[in-house]
Image (tube, rainbow, N blue to C red):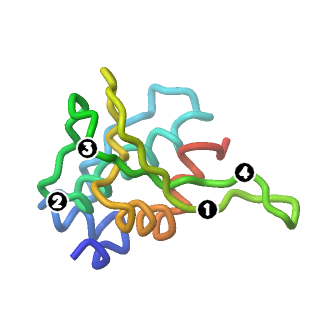
Amino acid sequence: MYTDIKTFEDACQVLNLDSTTIIPDFSLFPESDKEAMIAHAKLVIIAKAINGDWVPNWNDWDQYKYYPWFEMGSPSGGGFSFADYVGWGAHSGVGSRLCFETRDQAKYAGKQFEDLYKTYFVKA
């Protein structure tokens, strides 16, 4: 069950990957980008583990794809936090590796891995 995936290491275990060696070496990239690139690599693996055998069909206009949706700022005045999910049914020539088959999966990923998403999207 996807809710058993609580960490990056759990996702690697589901996919039979070695969590200590699977992340590429980003040492040639600017220091300011390394953390975001590592977070993205981890999120790709996590999404694949949560989705199981499901692969988004970007040519199917009727197939919904769900993404965690985040808020920048809050009523209290700051922060980055999971807000909800968003689903799209659209034709695209470019897909996202970070979409999910169901809204529940998108909500779970957004909440459970909020810190990784924050690092990927906004942390400098």
Of mark 3 and mark 4, the one earlier in the sequence is 3
Mark 3 belongs to which amino acid?
Gln
Q: Position of residue 48 (x, y in %)?
A: 24, 53
Q: Which mark is residue 83?
A: 1
- Assign a secondary structure to mark 4: strand
Q: Position of residue 112 (x, y in %)?
A: 46, 70
Q: Nearer the viewer, residue 101 or 27?
A: 101
Residue 123 percent coordinates (x, y)? 65, 46
Of labels 3 and 1, earlier in sequence is 3
**As shown in the figure, which amino acid type bears the numbered disc 1?**
Ala
Q: Amino acid at mark 4?
A: Met
Separation of disc 4 and disc 1 at Cα? 9 Å
Separation of disc 1 and disc 2 at Cα? 24 Å
Residue occupied by mark 4: 72
The correct choice, above or below, for 104 with respect to 51 in the image is below
Query: Residue 61 is drawn in which quadrant?
Result: top left
Q: Write down the residue under mark 3.
A: 63
Decide which of tag 3 and tag 2 comes sooner along the chain. 2
Residue placed at 78% from the left, 55% from the top?
73
Between the C-alphas of marks 3 and 2, the distance is 17 Å
The front one of 121 and 34 is 121
Disc 2 crowd, CA 10 A, few/some/many (<14, 14-19, 20+): some
